[in-house]
Image: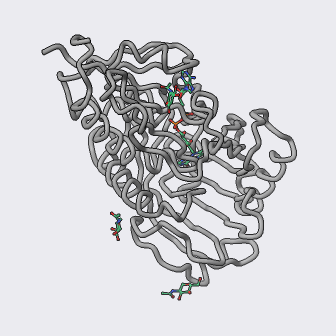
């Protein structure tokens, strides 16, 4: 029997991981293509801190977050312990979350406990919080690594901007929507909105712990310092509904001053990059089979996997596996294109 055709739209962390996960599950039974207008290093995912920690999520979706987050934590942890750890910059990272209330969604992390008095004193204003160990991945290395894997498995890559599903539907049995914020236009999904994030990337190899300073009274400006495998990310803003992708000088001062107040040695760090990304935020992250396009009608079935907001990396492998299960189900229902 001829292999069935699956198309993944999007080449950020959601699209690439979903495409590879489908190949792993179905191997030679399917041919998987990726269609996207932007690839690494130009996607939103490339600028992500790569830090595991559910951020800006809806507590009403806690069951999904815990499931997908746990699966992704284990996956990054296993990558860290594998021979590929260095290729993708997977690391275990310990550090401090300063906050006046308990940090949500940290059950999966290792060694979570309240700060001691000495640790509270690390904060210039002496602040309570928790210390924990989590995982991180260098997304700028991880995306090309996934792409190589995808192509080695026989995956097809097409660079193209899609304006409607009708362009793809005739050629595929299943289409997976991993378009991030792009779905706002494609699907006219106005539940999807940008949460603007501005960050610095600096060279500061002496920093070995992460620092997150949560200001409950001003959730738009959280100060964080995340040392990745190659550079340290200093953030950052969370401006809901703001489409501005230009670096803003007021935000720059706020982030720089906030981070240098927390760790004055950063004043001497070399700035490598300033960057703005728009997180694809949705009331609920959408990983589901489209009710109107199930594949039973002879058209392509549509599986959605978008709207991950500030947690796209944190949840990606769990979501990729969930989307893969939906693709398997849709392929069973699909009327083979060759029979039409
Ligand atoms: C400053 C900042 C820091 C962050 N830090 C973290 C972090 O530490 N940890 C974490 O978990 N998350 C973090 N995030 C969030 C994370 O980056 C996102 O959740 C994630 O990148 C979303 O991935 P995605 O693959 O869904 O979308 P994207 O990376 O945006 O990819 C979308 C893809 O779809 C394609 N596409 C869209 N529309 C079309 C179209 N019409 N035709 C063809 N192709 C199309 C694009 O070209 C692209 O390839 C951060 C975000 C920001 C902004
Ligand atoms: C996630 O992992 C934590 C810690 O091991 C566990 O307590 C929790 O039940 C898990 N949740 C899910 C949904 O798997
Ligand atoms: C940790 O701190 C919180 C307040 O931030 C407190 O409610 C809790 O009891 C503390 N837990 C332990 C084990 O001390
Ligand atoms: C995503 O799904 C919607 C249907 O809900 C469709 O209108 C849109 O074109 C799809 N996008 C892609 C790129 O397949």
> In the displayed structure, would residue 307 be above or below residue 7?
below
Which residue corresponds to the image point at 51% horizontal and 49% vertical from the top-left? 285
Q: Position of residue 332 (x, y in %)?
A: 21, 32
* Ligand 3 sits in quadrant: bottom right
Residue 208 seen in render: yes
Residue 63 lies in what quarter of the image? Answer: bottom left
**Please, is residue 335 above or below residue 230 in the view?**
above
Q: Is residue 335 left or right of residue 306?
A: left
Q: Nearer the viewer, residue 28 or 334?
A: 334
User: What residue appears at the point 39 percent right and 53 percent down from the top-left corner?
Assistant: 68
Task: Please give left or right for residue 228 compared with residue 17 in the image.
Answer: right
Task: Work out whether residue 239 or residue 301 is closer to the camera in this orientation and state it.
Answer: 301
Q: Nearer the viewer, residue 75 or 10?
A: 10
Q: Position of residue 304 (x, y in %)?
A: 44, 37
**Residue 248 drawn at (x, y percent):** 83, 40
Please state the horizontal and vertical placement of residue 45, each as a whole percent of the image: 54, 36
x 84%, y 49%: residue:
253
* Residue visible at 26% across and 26% down in the picture: 334
In the figure, 101 relative to 180: above or below?
Answer: below
In this picture, residue 227 sits left or right of residue 218: left
Q: Quadrant of the N terminus?
A: top left
Question: Is 123 positioned to the left or the right of 91 in the image?
Answer: right
Q: Looking at the figure, which quarter contains the C terminus? A: top left
Front residue of this view, candidates 111 and 186: 186
Task: Tell me the colour scheme of the image.
Answer: one colour
């Amino acid at each position: 029997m001829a292999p069935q055709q699956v198309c993944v739209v999007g080449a950020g962390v959601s699209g690439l991981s979903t495409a590879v996960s489908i190949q792993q599950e179905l191997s030679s039974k399917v041919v998987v293509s990726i269609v996207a207008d932007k690839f690494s290093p130009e996607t939103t995912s490339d600028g992500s801190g790569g830090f595991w920690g559910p951020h800006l999520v809806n507590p009403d979706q806690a069951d999904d977050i815990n499931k997908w987050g746990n699966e992704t934590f284990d996956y990054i942890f296993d990558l860290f312990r594998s021979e590929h750890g260095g290729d993708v910059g997977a690391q275990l990272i310990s550090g401090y979350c300063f906050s006046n209330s308990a940090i949500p969604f940290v059950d999966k992390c290792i060694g979570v406990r309240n700060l001691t008095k000495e640790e509270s004193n690390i904060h210039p204003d002496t602040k309570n919080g928790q210390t924990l160990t989590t995982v991180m991945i260098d997304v700028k290395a991880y995306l090309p690594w996934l792409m190589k894997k995808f192509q080695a498995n026989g995956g097809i890559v097409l660079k193209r901007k899609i304006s409607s599903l009708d362009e793809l539907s005739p050629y595929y049995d299943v289409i997976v929507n991993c378009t991030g914020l792009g779905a706002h236009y494609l699907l006219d999904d106005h539940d999807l909105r940008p949460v603007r994030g501005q960050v610095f990337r600096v060279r500061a190899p002496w920093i070995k712990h992460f620092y997150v300073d949560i200001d409950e009274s001003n959730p738009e400006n959280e100060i964080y310092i995340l040392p990745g495998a190659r550079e340290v990310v200093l953030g950052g803003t969370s401006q809901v509904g703001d489409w501005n992708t230009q670096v803003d000088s007021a935000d720059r001062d706020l982030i720089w001053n906030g981070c240098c107040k927390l760790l004055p040695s950063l004043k001497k760090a070399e700035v490598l990059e300033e960057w703005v990304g728009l997180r694809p935020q949705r009331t609920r992250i959408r990983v589901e089979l489209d009710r109107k396009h199930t594949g039973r009608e002879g058209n392509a079935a549509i599986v959605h996997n978008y709207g991950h907001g500030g947690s796209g990396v944190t949840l990606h492998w769990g979501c990729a596996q969930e989307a893969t299960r939906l693709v398997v189900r849709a392929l069973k229902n699909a009327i083979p294109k060759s029979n039409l």
